[in-house]
Image (cartoon, rainbow, N blue to C red):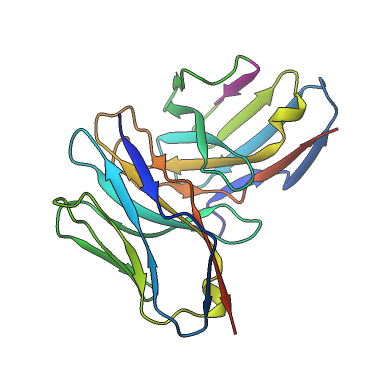
Amino acid sequence: GNSVTQMEGPVTLSEEAFLTINCTYTATGYPSLFWYVQYPGEGLQLLLKATKADDKGSNKGFEATYRKETTSFHLEKGSVQVSDSAVYFCALSERGNNNDMRFGAGTRLTVKP
Amino acid sequence: DAMVIQNPRYQVTQFGKPVTLSCSQTLNHNVMYWYQQKSSQAPKLLFHYYDKDFNNEADTPDNFQSRRPNTSFCFLDIRSPGLGDAAMYLCATSRDKGREKLFFGSGTQLSVL
């Protein structure tokens, strides 16, 4: 079945550091890939998405590229801010798969000033 | 401007006492979902409605039920909460099935005493 594996946290960085959170997936077909962010005490928000191979999703300085050859969708940001502290979830959804959005376990990011 | 609204934000119930969590949406989306999220874990899909069609996940306990009286509202009923049901419950919507992004509410944090 479909699944998502993401880098275990927690990740602690200093402000302006470079961020990478790894995500790999297993899917039977051609899923869409997502990154969601969850700030403390809140629900999840969509951060970015990509719907086909080689697509790059980007938002708020974050980027991720859909790599079919490595089945990966790693999240990157060149210069993190304290306000980026949150939990990040990689997810996939596949047409015809009963509509199930599969989430990774989440990676907690803490950015220190 | 909240589009998916969950009430209450915090809910405390007693062991075995039925509890209902509510969710409403202003997006007119066809699909509504309930997820359970325990501390430091990925959200776990309990069930979803596609319009009036109810879809239960195979491993969702019978203790959990849902109702969708109209497009805008969806309820999660826990008939006899146990200590293990303490969690964040997230409601989400999507326009249609498969590969669609989800819009989440802020969640209801359920405590069971």
Q: Residue at x 66, y 56 (%)?
A: A41
Question: Chief secondary structure of the magenta span?
Answer: strand
In x, y percent, where is residue B113?
86, 32
Residue B88 versus residue A112 in the image, above or below? above
Which segment did they paint magenta? B63-68
Picture quarter containing residue B35?
A: top right
Left or right? Give the position of B70 relative to A17. right
Q: Residue at x 16, y 50 (%)?
A: A68
**Quadrant in the rendering for residue B11:** top right
Q: Position of residue A111 (x, y in %)?
A: 55, 75
Residue at 75% across, 18% down: B80
From the viewer's side, name the closer residue of B74 and A65: A65
Task: Report the front residue among A102 and A110.
Answer: A110
Q: Is residue A87 magenta?
A: no
Horizontal relation, residue B56 to residue B16: left or right: left
Give the residue at x 53% y 37%.
B72
Q: Is residue A101 above or below residue A34?
A: above
Q: In screen coordinates, is A33 left or right of B46?
A: left
Question: Would you say B46 lies left or right of A5 here?
Answer: right
- Can residue A26 be seen? yes
Q: Is residue B96 visible?
A: no
Quadrant occupied by the C terminus of chain A: bottom right
Q: Nearer the viewer, residue A7 or A80?
A: A7
Q: Where residue B28 appears, x then y in whole percent?
A: 44, 42
Q: Residue furthest top?
A: B62
Give the total of numbered labels.
0
Residue A34 pos. (x, y %): 34, 53
- The N terminus of chain A lies in quadrant: top left
Q: Quadrant of residue B76?
A: top right
